[in-house]
């Protein structure tokens, strides 16, 4: 833990998707919600699951598994919606589970590896090795912007 | 004193008082003999003066004071209302408005108003033979003098079982907030009776222009002892002496008073019978006028200012509560417990009422914007020597507060434009066979999810050729483009940036900004502006504004398990049709609806609703909707019913979704999408 207390560190929310762990800076996270009723919005991208009522604010929901073209799984008890805000957008990400907040020392962050192997590499801003875990840092702008 | 925290309130209230002044001045111009109106103006001005003095805006207070003097002279029939006098008063109000605006934008409210002040003084003095004597003698004296009016009030109230007291209040020498204590004393007094007179005058008391002691004449049903005890409760009050007024002494005192202030007393006495209503009470009775204001203030004006952000928070919290209500309802129906059911039911009813109140709280009538225009038109018509009649229709139309705040300036611009470029001068109008007086109509109404605001004039209209020539000269369009342009498109060229149709930049509309600014503002509000114009007949500017956050009535419909909302404003009617009534025309299914061929739109296809199993029902539920003259039948599974909903946007991530104009949150907390019927009809 001594390393983590270093000045140059960022606090992130860690979540699970398929067999990997991802991280989003806490500054972009508005909250973590349990799965709730999602209203489908027609004629949108497949990964847009629809909209939810987040305490009176209609918030769009993106299924990250579908966004990364990972195999789709049934929603389970641990499934969470992470509400993120970026610029003037608020969007919820459906993830398999979210249960960790950690500090990553800036020194542990490395640029995105050359080969990660799938479409998701488009959405990665870097990786961080913290103790024995490998965390994938999401590039939020790219996740939210439509693919070229 | 921490002034900043009151600044916003001060600005808002000042604006209101100034607005009231303008409105009443316009009324006064129409009926110059109605002194009740002068009283209204005087009261607004007086309050404004007090407020600005308290806030430390001396210039503002000073100018208001000068204006007040003129009004007072009018009220006391020392001078007669003439258009010239009104011009000066209007000018003062303009200055005051500018000062308040300056304060609002962070300035100190200072402004050179010497010429207006000089004019006000000239009016006040020039037309007045006798200088208005100070009401209460300048020196503070131990006993009060009563004029005829006040004596009548005192005598009458004692006939009705009221006691009349003279109260002497002495503040402690170390009293810091003298005006505040005075206020507290008056508040207590006004609760239990009416203040007839104060010495020194109420204004002076408010301005802390007294030493430690002041006197009040007061009528009440309370006993002297009670009043004394109540007033002693005010902190920093040293001594309160309550003595009954000796009414027998009136005749002598009146004589004395008359000797002192001959002119006023006669005027007052003559005026008393005619001035039965409180509004027109002479200024001498400044204190009762103040009391009256509290007691007889129109009920509609009892408002409180709330920060709009707080309303947003309230709204969101309330919606959360609605969700929980839904849950409670379903739990109570499962548990089936008598008392629980009853409580939940009652709670639901209360929440229903609460919802209506919260939702309507943000809505403001456009009147708040429209009411500044009569004065503007008056000024413009005087400046331009044109005769203009302004008609306002639909001022009660309600619009979201956020839109109201933004729409004022564009409207000012458009109205100036209509008056300056639209309405011709009387000579030209006569030559054209039109009435000399031009008409500008300002109209607001609701239609669908939109509010329309129209500015229509019967002026010269837009000169198509001139506009086109100018547009080509300025490079807004090319010669080739111009051939294929419709009249409407040409009219709307005047909204293009860097375009001004005026040959000479006039003082009125040529302020270096064109109508393009108007267009930009309206579009930034999510609105739209269009122009219709016929040369020599007139023009109509039509602004369409969305109700950003407002309540609309919708019909909720169901398709499979999905609920959609169709705005009631688009719906003509609903009907159930048989499959056999559906006909095919060019691969398009149509029905015969009252002799009209109406195309059918199957919402489940448009919205790609996932179906578990294909239904093949004999009957279809159809909602007949319209866009202008065109009709379409939306086929759904079933109707749920009509409901009032709050419009919500889908946010910035999901934009431009086909045939969906927004979303709403239903009573059960789920989101339902709102169908954009306009997109469904080609």
Image: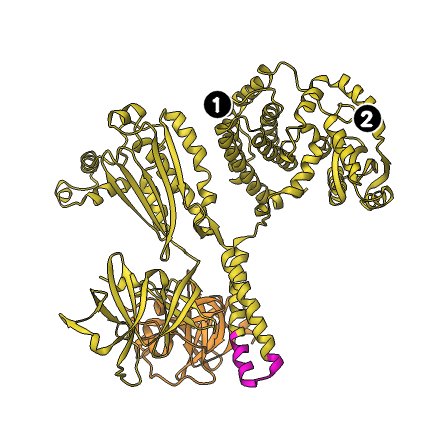
Chain colours: A orange, B yellow
Between discs 2 and 1, the one toward the N terminus: 1
Q: How many marks?
A: 2
Instruction: List the residue tagged with mark 2.
Output: B250
Tell me, yes or no, if residue A128 can be seen here: yes
Q: At 37% across and 85% down in the image, what residue appears?
A: A73
* Callouts 2 and 1 close, C-beta under 8 Å: no
B200 is within the stretch colored magenta? no
Q: Main secondary structure of the magenta part?
A: helix
- Quarter of the image for residue B80 reads top right
Neighbours of disc 2 within 10 Å: few (<14), some (14-19), many (20+): some
Q: Do tags 2 and 1 sit on the same chain?
A: yes
Q: Nearer the viewer, residue B98 or B242?
A: B242
Q: Nearer the viewer, residue B40 or B467?
A: B40
Q: Position of residue B461 (x, y in %)?
A: 26, 35
Neighbours of disc 1 within 10 Å: few (<14), some (14-19), many (20+): few
Tell me, yes or no, if residue B3 can be seen here: no
In this rendering, the label closer to the viewer, 2 or 1: 2
Instruction: List the residue tagged with mark 1.
Output: B83
B338 is within the stretch colored magenta? yes
- In the image, is B153 to the left or to the right of B655? right
- In the image, is B125 to the left or to the right of B209? left
Q: Position of residue B258 (x, y in %)?
A: 76, 19
Subunit that carries the residue with mark 2: B
Q: Position of residue A119 (x, y in %)?
A: 30, 76
Which residues make up the magenta segment?
A: B326-340
The span from disc 2 to disc 1 (Cα, nearest Å) is: 42 Å
- Image vertical order of residue A103 relative to residue B417, above or below: below
The residue lying furthest to the front in this view is B159
Subunit that carries the residue with mark 1: B
Q: At 58% across and 34% down in the image, what residue appears?
A: B40
Q: Nearer the viewer, residue B386 or A134?
A: B386
Q: Secondary structure at mark 2?
A: helix
């Amino acid at each position: 833990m001594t390393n983590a207390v270093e000045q140059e560190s960022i606090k992130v929310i860690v979540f699970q998707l398929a067999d990997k762990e991802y991280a989003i800076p806490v500054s972009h996270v508005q909250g973590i919600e349990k799965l709730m009723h999602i209203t489908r919005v027609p004629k949108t991208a497949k990964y847009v699951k629809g909209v939810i009522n987040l305490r009176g604010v209609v918030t769009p929901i993106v299924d990250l598994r579908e966004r990364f073209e990972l195999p789709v799984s049934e929603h389970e008890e641990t499934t969470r919606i992470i509400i993120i805000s970026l610029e003037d957008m608020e969007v919820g990400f459906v993830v398999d589970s979210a249960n960790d907040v950690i500090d990553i020392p800036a020194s542990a962050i490395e640029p995105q590896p050359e080969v990660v192997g799938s479409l998701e590499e488009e959405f990665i801003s870097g990786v961080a090795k913290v103790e024995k875990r490998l965390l994938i840092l999401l590039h939020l702008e790219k996740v939210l912007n439509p693919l070229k | 004193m921490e002034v900043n925290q009151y600044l916003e309130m001060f600005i808002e209230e000042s604006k209101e008082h100034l607005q009231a002044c303008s409105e009443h001045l316009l009324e006064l111009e129409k009926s110059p003999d109605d002194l009740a109106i002068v009283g209204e103006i005087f009261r607004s001005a007086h309050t404004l003066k007090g407020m600005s003095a308290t806030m430390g805006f001396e210039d503002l207070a000073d100018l208001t004071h000068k204006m007040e003097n003129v009004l007072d002279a009018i009220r006391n029939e020392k001078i007669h209302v003439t258009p010239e006098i009104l011009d000066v008063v209007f000018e003062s109000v303009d200055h005051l408005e500018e000062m308040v605006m300056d304060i609002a934008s962070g300035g100190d409210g200072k402004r050179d108003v010497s010429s207006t002040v000089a004019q006000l003084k000239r009016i006040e003095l020039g037309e007045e033979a006798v200088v208005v004597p100070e009401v209460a003698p300048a020196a503070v004296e131990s006993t009060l003098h009563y004029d005829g009016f006040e004596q009548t009030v005192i005598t009458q109230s004692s006939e009705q079982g009221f006691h009349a007291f003279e109260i002497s209040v002495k503040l402690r020498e170390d009293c810091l907030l003298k005006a505040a204590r005075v206020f507290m004393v008056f508040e207590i007094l006004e609760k239990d009776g009416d203040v007839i007179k104060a010495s020194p005058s109420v204004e002076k008391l408010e301005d802390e222009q007294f030493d430690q002691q002041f006197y009040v004449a007061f009528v009440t049903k309370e006993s002297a002892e009670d009043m004394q005890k109540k007033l002693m409760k005010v902190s920093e009050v040293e001594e309160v002496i309550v003595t009954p007024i000796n009414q027998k002494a009136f005749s002598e005192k009146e004589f004395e008073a008359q000797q002192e202030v001959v002119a006023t007393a006669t005027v007052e006495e003559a005026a008393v019978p005619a001035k039965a209503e409180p509004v027109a009470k002479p200024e001498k009775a400044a204190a009762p006028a103040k009391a009256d204001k509290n007691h007889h203030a129109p009920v509609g004006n009892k408002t409180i200012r709330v920060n709009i952000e707080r309303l947003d928070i309230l709204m969101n919290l309330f919606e959360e509560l609605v969700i929980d209500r839904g849950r409670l309802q379903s739990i109570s129906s499962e548990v089936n417990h008598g008392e629980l059911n009853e409580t939940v039911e009652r709670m639901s009813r209360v929440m229903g009422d609460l919802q209506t109140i919260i939702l309507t709280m943000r809505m403001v009538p456009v009147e708040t914007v429209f009411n500044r225009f009569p004065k503007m038109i008056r000024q413009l018509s005087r400046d331009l020597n044109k005769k203009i009649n302004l008609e306002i229709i639909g001022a009660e139309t309600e619009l979201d507060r956020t839109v109201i705040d933004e729409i004022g300036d564009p409207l000012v611009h458009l109205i100036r434009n209509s008056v300056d470029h639209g309405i011709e001068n009387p000579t030209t109008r006569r030559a054209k066979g039109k009435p000399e007086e031009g008409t500008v109509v300002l109209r607001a109404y609701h239609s669908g999810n939109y509010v329309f605001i129209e500015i229509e004039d019967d002026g010269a209209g837009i000169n198509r050729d001139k506009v086109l020539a100018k547009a080509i000269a300025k490079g807004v369009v090319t010669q080739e483009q111009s051939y294929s342009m419709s009249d409407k498109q040409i009219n709307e060229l005047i909204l293009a940036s860097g375009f001004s149709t005026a040959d000479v930049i006039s003082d009125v509309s040529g302020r270096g900004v064109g109508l393009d600014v108007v267009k930009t503002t309206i579009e930034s509000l999510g609105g739209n502006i269009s122009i219709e114009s016929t040369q020599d007949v007139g023009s109509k500017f039509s602004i369409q504004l969305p109700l950003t956050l407002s309540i609309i009535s919708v019909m909720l419909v169901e398709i499979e398990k999905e609920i959609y909302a169709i705005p009631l404003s688009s719906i003509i009617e609903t009907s159930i049709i048989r499959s056999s009534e559906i006909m095919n025309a060019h691969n398009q299914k149509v029905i015969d609806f009252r002799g009209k061929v109406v195309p059918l739109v199957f919402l489940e296809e448009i919205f790609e609703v996932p179906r578990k199993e294909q239904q093949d029902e004999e009957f279809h539920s159809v909602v007949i909707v319209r866009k202008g003259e065109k009709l379409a039948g939306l086929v759904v599974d079933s109707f749920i019913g009509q409901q009032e909903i709050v419009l919500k946007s889908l946010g910035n991530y999901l934009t431009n979704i086909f045939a969906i104009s927004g979303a709403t949150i239903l009573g059960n907390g789920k989101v339902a999408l709102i169908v954009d019927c306009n997109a469904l009809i080609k």
